Image (spheres, rainbow, N blue to C red):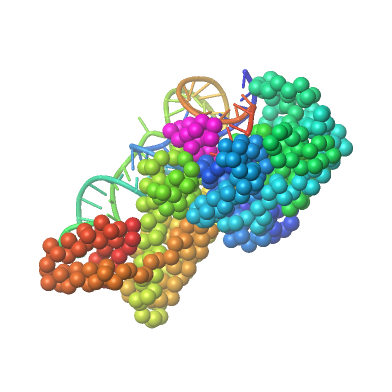
Amino acid sequence: MKLYNTMHQRKEEFVPIQPGKVNIYACGPTVYDFFHIGNARPFIVFDVLRRFFEYIGYEVTFVQNFTDVDDKIINRSHEEGRSPQEVAETYIEEYFTDADALGIRRADVHPRDSENMPEIIELISILVDKGHAYQVNGNVYYRVASFEDYGKLSGQSIDDLNCGARIDVNDEKESPLDFALWKRKKEGEPYWDSPWSPGRPGWHIECSAMSRKYLGDTIDIHGGGKDLVFPHHENEIAQSEGACGCTFANYWVHNGYIQIDGAKMSKSLGNFKTIRDISKHYDLEVVRMFMLMAHYRSPIDFNDKLLTAAGSALERMYTVRDQMLFLLDNVDDHEPSEEEKIWVSELANYKEQFIADLKDDLNTADGIATIFELVRDINSHLNESSAKKTIEAAYSLFTELTDVLGLVVKERETNLDDAIEALIAERQEARKNKDFARADEIRDQLTAQGIVLEDTREGVKWKRV
RNA sequence: GGUGCUAUAGCCAAGUGGUAAGGCAAAGGUCUGCAACACCUCCACCCCCGGUUCAAAUCCGGGUAGCACCUCCA
């Protein structure tokens, strides 16, 4: 498995700390609102990374946090007139609603800041003891100058950063680059007791503390969106490595942005679209398809036209899946022919190719291309005279591959209203009597209801659109 | 100013030295009562200019255009 490691800015062969095992920490959402399509990308990417590692035989431990103590949540709670905890709780639930619809599996652990205060405070204490942090008036800051590797992930020197920094005025800090580990509470804010003051953690320390607690001092993979490289992940490294004196994460994996009209989508620019909004117009599986059709590090533009195209592509996968299920129900159980046996044995090439695609830095775009080659092969080889075993082999491979991507997950619909069944029967009767006007009338009527009819050699079929 | 990224068909998008995957859309065909699905066919001077090489979309140099980070942000 090769992964692009932001730390060294190149693809590297993945070597796990423990053979056969991989642990992954992905930065999760700050739960103060519905998440948007830009947030969704890393959730989907790391979900696929995890599924693929499992597919090729790794035992995966996957941790994704919820940031539930934060300025944005506090602001929101003031706006809504309820407690920060209630705001966080609400949006954690909403996260799962959207994530489920996107086919994102639950992490093994979804830790929250509020539930890990002892670990966060302990980590800050270690940093203070080691001289990497200092206290001023109940606030604790990280002393960036004490960590000589600072800037190694983002490829910048402390001097460069100092030079370009748009710094906030803060007399308490020794250097503008220093960042808060602990903030003394202000009026109306939630707080926890600590050796320094009643207050709350800064916005980088949680990930260091929770990664350490659940996965250990050194982990295999740490990931998130590209915009987290600096300062978030840079600061995490300073905290974690400053505290333990060892490497924090062996591989740093970052996904590219979603753009709107070529510009970054972000909450601050206000040009974002929430997944919840999109779900009103599209099945969210289409969004997943759309994301995976590009490599995770490429920036991708988002608009309705592209989403519609992704929907058509996904539909093609469903069509072949349903066709195989149909054949399995209707074909008799005879022995496969010699040609069929050869064809089945060659299916293994698709699997091999698919694995090679994803092993190359999780190239899902290539993986999907391979699946479409398989789709064409299936469509041109399987029919009502195929042997059941042959169809089963193709079906099993197809679902195996789409499962890795978390696509084609909806079950085939098999039930229709009696009224619609009756209409379909009436239409068949009309067609038999060459009353095509009536037949087309019924077909149009059903289309208007979202039921598309197809007259095939194997009989009439329907699907919902 | 510092640090990175991107530029491939109408649209999207893989491909990192051997002569352009895949999807969407359009066109022609087979199938169909007509459609739809499916299948077949068709669709690329790989941003520009130099260079290295038997061979470059792919490597090197120089341009041009766009984007991002350095500030909360996936």
Q: How many marks?
A: 0
The residue at 76%/38% (across/down) is A199
A263 within the magenta span: yes
* Viewer-side residue, A202 vs A102: A202
Residue A277 appears in the rendering? yes
Tell me if residue A369 can be seen.
no
Q: Quadrant of residue A80?
A: top right
Residue A337 coordinates in the image, percent (x, y): 39, 76
> Where residue A370 sits in the image (x, y, percent)?
46, 55
Depicted A15 relative to depicted A33: above or below: below
- Residue at the image point whose x is 78% and y is 24% from the top: A172
Q: Which residue reaches farthest right?
A: A129
Magenta segment range? Answer: A253-272
List x then y, in percent, for residue A112.
Answer: 68, 49
Which residue is pictured at 67% across the width and 31% down the height?
Answer: A155
**Of A383 and A336, which appears nearest the observer?**
A383
Pick the quarter of the image with the C terminus of chain A: bottom left
